[in-house]
Amino acid sequence: MNQDRVSIAVEGDIEDRISVLPRNVIDCILEFLPVKEAAKTCTLSKSWRYIWSELPKMVLDYEFCDELIDESESKFREVVDGIMLLHMGKIVKFDLDVRVEDLASYTAIDRWVLYVTRNSVKKLHLRISNIGDRTYTLPPCIFHCSTLTQLKLARCSFKPPGSFRGFPNLVTLRLASVTFSEHCVIKAPLLANLTLNCCDGMQYLNIVSPVLKSLYVCYPHSYIALNCFMNCKNLRDLGLVFSKVVDNPNHDHRSTLVKFLGSLPALELLSADVVLSSGPPFMLNCLRKLSLSVDFGKLGHISCVLQLIECSPNLNELEITVNGTDDNIEAFVKCLKMADCLQLPLNKLEYVSFYGFASPICVEAFAMLFIIQARSLLRIFIEQPLGTKSSKDLSGLPRASPKAELVIS
């Protein structure tokens, strides 16, 4: 009898503890759960019954959506409609990652997006994968949502209405596989972070953002116009990935990378998977970190890298991802022995890293340049394939910096 009383008391104590948890703690717990699991918590306690429906973050991830769509797309639409119907209060974040085929699902997505934009959504993430050639076109309500601070879109068509006046509070914009089919001006006075990944029709795009600090552009299939970013004077972090050299005299109206770099007096971080035809005719005085993808089989690439280093007197960190072969090793070494290479401004350089398994002999020759000359060098890292050995004993070289550590892994 006493044992039963103790058992009841313990169970009651557990229920009471769940019931009296602070609301912010409960919200934090539920935010880490998928929607399906969060809904099940309504059975834990009377005080928890409706909390899941009041969460300000609604995340419908791919796993959740795909499980429903495997039954049928109509089932998927029915369930999400029910979630929207039961939800109470504002929706700060709405995340939808789904693969659809039925046009009725596009209409339903429009309806859900309209609902969240009317509920003061701040963070909107849409990834609409489709089966076939159809592309989801963003509804006009997105372009009229003034509360947005973060917008992430993937696999959709970006066609703002004529009444579009920009995103007044947007701070982060990330677009992946988004299509622009007509001239589009995006005014975002607070935009600080912009990512454009494999977007089509970027020649129609014009970004107006005086406070932009971080820009990443990946377009591996063609040239790209950088004119639309010329007014981003406060840019600190720049990442560029292309398949072709962008500084091509034959494409001067589209390839303006040198001019673009010259318009960025505050640039601190530069990452590029493309090499200029020549070094910039100006100084990058604020540049602290330089990350490049370099073909050591092409002397033009080596010359450009050296010129970029020469134009960056305050460079602190250099990362090089190596491509190409050692076929041109003699000319490569000869290039490094030129007088200009032996007078590089390396006083601030502390970290140098080489990644990739191509051109091991060229890598070692290039590493020697920094070991011998960089007076502030703290660490030089060389990635090597498992089981291979260095052809030269770099550790025995005289070092300009007594603190320099050589790591080969």
Image (cartoon, rainbow, N blue to C red):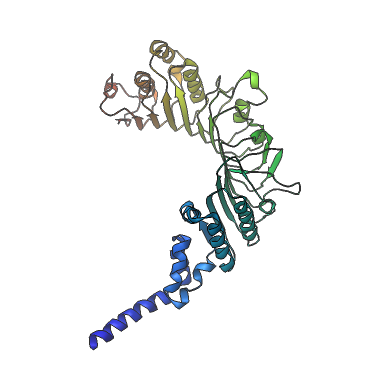
Is 373 placed above or below 56 here?
A: above
Q: Residue furthest right?
A: 162
x, y (%) of residue 278?
55, 19
Asked if residue 367 shows in the view, the reply is yes
Q: Give the number of callouts.
A: 0
Measured as percent of width and height from the top left, residue 11 is found at: 33, 79
Q: Quadrant of the N terminus?
A: bottom left
Q: Position of residue 58 (x, y in %)?
A: 53, 60
Residue at 54% x, 30% y: name it. 220
Q: Position of residue 277 (x, y in %)?
A: 56, 19
Picture residue at 43% right of the left edge, 31% below the top: 319
Looking at the image, which residue is at 43% across and 73% down?
A: 43
Instruction: Using residue 4 as the reference point, say whether residue 97 is left or right of it.
Output: right
Is 52 or 398 nearer to us in this picture?
Answer: 52
107, above or below 403, in the image: below
Task: Say if 10 sits above or below 347 in the image.
Answer: below
> In terms of depth relative to the viewer, which is nearer, 178 or 169?
178
**Residue 184 or residue 100, whichever sits in front:** 100
Apparent side of residue 255 relative to residue 333 in the rendered image (left or right): right
180 vs 305, nearest the viewer:
180
Residue extending farthest to the bottom is: 1
Quarter of the picture holding the C terminus: top left
- Can residue 25 be seen from the camera position used here? no
